[in-house]
């Protein structure tokens, strides 16, 4: 039987799955239009870019907010391609130095933390991820760091009494996944950088 705490992840996965299919059909329609005399029009280019962006975001959200069975794994090329465009749109560059494939639940936690770090880098920046035998190290650097202490305390210190908006949902979800994985997060803040270790 499904645990109540998993319902939100299953719901997110279902929504993403059901929306990707019609988006794929729209993408196919745009490709057909690109084969006609309309192919050079700015309207077709806008449609094509929008469909590509939406599909990329849904793939990313499906991993970050969806379910992850214990035996599921993701290869490095898939991990990078799934995260690259959504982060690029947020003016973030990903430096993923993890060489091998990973359990999907570890990728899910990394994606949620990428979203948390993205909220602290309003002007964009670079996020580097490394994984040793036992620990992850994620370092974010940018021209301006905008910490939100209450939200980060939820991850690092176990707080969580404040109201959460839709654009902050990654914080409690990351905390829940971390608890399930029995990991503890430490964070160090610099003037232009944030380092996370877990």
Image (cartoon, rainbow, N blue to C red):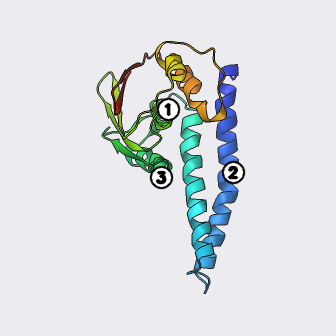
Binning the other alpha carbons within 10 Å of mark 3 as few (below 14), some (14 to 19) or many (20 upward) gives many
Which residue lies at the image location 50% right of the left edge and 32% below the top edge? 116
Q: Residue 65 shows which numbered tag?
A: none
Which residue lies at the image location 62% right of the left edge and 83% below the top edge? 38
> Mark 1 highlights which residue?
116
Binning the other alpha carbons within 10 Å of mark 1 as few (below 14), some (14 to 19) or many (20 upward) gives many
Residue 71 image point, x, y percent: 49, 31
Spatial separation of the CA atoms under disc 1 and disc 3: 17 Å
Q: Nearer the viewer, mark 2 or mark 3?
A: 3
The answer to whether the residues at label 2 and label 3 have Cβ atoms under 8 Å apart is no
Residue 122 image point, x, y percent: 47, 41
Spatial separation of the CA atoms under disc 2 and disc 1: 24 Å
Q: Nearer the viewer, mark 2 or mark 1?
A: 1
State which tag comes first along the sequence, 2 or 3.
Answer: 2
Please identify the quarter of the rendering in which residue 125 is found.
top left
> Mark 2 highlights which residue?
19
> Mark 3 highlights which residue?
85
Residue 68 image point, x, y percent: 55, 32
Which residue lies at the image location 44% right of the left edge and 38% below the top edge? 121
State which tag comes first along the sequence, 2 or 1.
Answer: 2
Name above or below for residue 55 compared with residue 46: above
Which residue lies at the image location 50% right of the left edge and 21% below the top edge? 149
Name above or below for residue 12 compared with residue 161: below
Tell me the SS state at disc 3: helix
């Amino acid at each position: 039987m499904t645990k109540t705490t998993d319902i939100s992840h299953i719901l997110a996965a279902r929504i993403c799955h059901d929306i990707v299919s019609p988006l794929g059909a729209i993408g196919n329609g745009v490709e057909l239009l690109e084969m006609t005399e309309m192919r050079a029009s700015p309207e077709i280019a806008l449609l094509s870019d929008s469909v590509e962006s939406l599909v990329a975001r849904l793939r990313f959200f499906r991993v970050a907010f969806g379910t992850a069975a214990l035996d599921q794994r993701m290869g490095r090329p898939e991990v990078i391609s799934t995260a690259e465009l959504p982060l690029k749109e947020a003016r973030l560059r990903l430096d993923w130095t993890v060489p091998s494939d990973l359990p999907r639940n570890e990728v899910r936690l990394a994606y949620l933390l990428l979203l948390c770090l993205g909220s602290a880098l309003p002007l964009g920046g670079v996020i580097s991820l490394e994984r040793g035998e036992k620990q992850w190290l994620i370092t974010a650097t940018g021209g301006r760091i905008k910490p939100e202490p209450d939200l980060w305390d939820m991850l690092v210190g176990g707080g969580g009494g404040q109201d959460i908006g839709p654009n902050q949902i990654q914080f409690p979800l990351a905390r829940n996944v971390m608890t399930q994985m029995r990991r503890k997060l430490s964070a160090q803040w610099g003037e232009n950088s944030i380092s996370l270790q877990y």
